[in-house]
Amino acid sequence: MVLQPRCDSSNNSADLQVGSTCLCLGKDVRKKRIIPPRTKKFNGLLNVSPQTKILSRMPNIKIFSGSSHKDLAQRIVDRLGIDLGKVVAKKFSNLETSVEIGESVRGEDVYIVQSGCGEINDNLMEMLIMINACKIASAARVTAVIPCFPYARQDKKDKVASRAPISAKLVANMLSVAGADHIITMDLHASQIQGFFDIPVDNLYAEPAVLKWIKENISDWKNSIIVSPDAGGAKRVTSIADRLNVEFALIHKERKKVNEVASMVLVGDVKDKIAILVDDMADTCGTICHAADKLLAAGAMKVYAILTHGIFSGPAVSRINNACFDAVVVTNTIPQDEHMKESGKIQLIDISNILAEAIRRTHNGESVSFLFNSVPL
């Protein structure tokens, strides 16, 4: 039996405690049991608010939103049952970005939601400043939640531009130097971008949500064919085609310069089938609109396009309106409210539940690989 010294406030000498018996100067004194006050209950449950119950399961967590996509950040915290952290982002008269974190983050697990869209350079700088502000304010861990990773298309040098920068690597370095401990993103343009980081990166996939949308919204989906608008997306479409147990095709394209397609060759038979174009992103939509025309000319009954990141810059929306799509489906990694007002063909898949579950699992130290194949309920 271990003897432990106990300091007695009424005596300068040290007592020795054995079990529940106190030996003090030869006296045998029974130690009083301290009974904590009973917690009031209501119908057998703790009489606390639902939000308090969530916080009791997820203590020490703060989620902040940047300026790029506040609606998505709000959906994430609503799903988790917590409030967005207070942060004020503003610009000085010379357009420098200023960020002030409005609450304590000392010892907290911090998540900063900022997508690579809109004014990309300003939003990227704002995110870096927010990460650094939380880090030097003694946050235990800072995770950057970047649904659409900026500069992801600048991931390698090519034969034409041998002196081109690898800007995706530069962004990775900037995030690490700012103080990010972990990155959560979705459908990277090239999975190898994960290797640009020396910190953990969770690259989530929209594929489970895409499969769910197809089965719920295309009645004759078993007569569909999954089409990649370029050879680089072949792995993506074969995965979806295998899970739906349908065929796949691809379109080989050649570019003369950025955002301009020179020629297209269809590989596969789409006659009398519902063609579903799947890609990770669409910018000016030149590629997918030309691909839709190619598919229709090859005998496809209907043409859908499903994209993870709908950038839709320049003439994109007008091209969609004039194209032969039955629907162009995008996730909300990028705000789509304005685009949906301009085109009735654009439909939305909400992926906030996937990001929220990834945050919950990361905070609780659980695996996120479940999300690679399933949509959270």
Image (cartoon, helix red, strand yellow):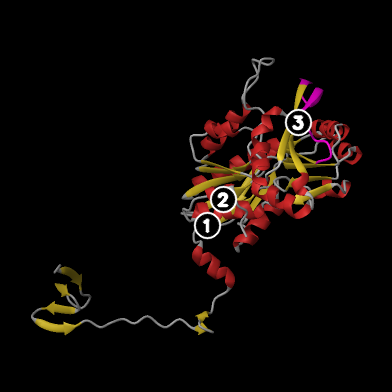
For mark 2, what is the residue? 111
Quadrant of the rendered image containing residue 261: top right
Say which amino acid is labelled 3. Gly
Numbered disc 1: secondary structure: strand
Say which amino acid is labelled 2. Tyr
Q: Is residue 260 magenta?
A: yes
Determine the residue located farthest toward the right in the rendered image: 322
| Segment colored magenta | 255-273
Distance of label 2 from label 3 (alpha carbons): 44 Å
Asked whether the beta carbons under mark 1 and mark 2 sit within 8 Å of each other, the answer is yes
Assess disc 1: are there few (<14), some (14-19) or many (≥20) residues with their C-alpha within 10 Å of its C-alpha.
Answer: many
Residue 299 % position (x, y) = 86, 35
Q: Residue at x 78, y 47 (%)?
A: 336
For mark 1, what is the residue? 61
Quadrant of the rendered image containing residue 272: top right
Say which amino acid is labelled 1. Ile
- What label does residue 268 carry, if any? 3
Assess disc 3: are there few (<14), some (14-19) or many (≥20) residues with their C-alpha within 10 Å of its C-alpha.
Answer: some
Distance of label 3 from label 1 (alpha carbons): 49 Å
Q: Residue at x 60, y 32 (%)?
A: 171
Q: Quadrant of the C terminus?
A: bottom right
Query: Which is nearer the eye, 310 or 73?
Result: 310
Asked whether the beta carbons under mark 3 and mark 1 sit within 8 Å of each other, the answer is no
Determine the residue located farthest toward the left in the rendered image: 26
Residue 236 % position (x, y) = 66, 37
Q: Quadrant of the N terminus?
A: bottom left
Residue 86 % position (x, y) = 62, 56
Q: Tell me, yes or no, if residue 159 can be seen here.
A: yes
Quadrant of the rendered image containing residue 129: top right
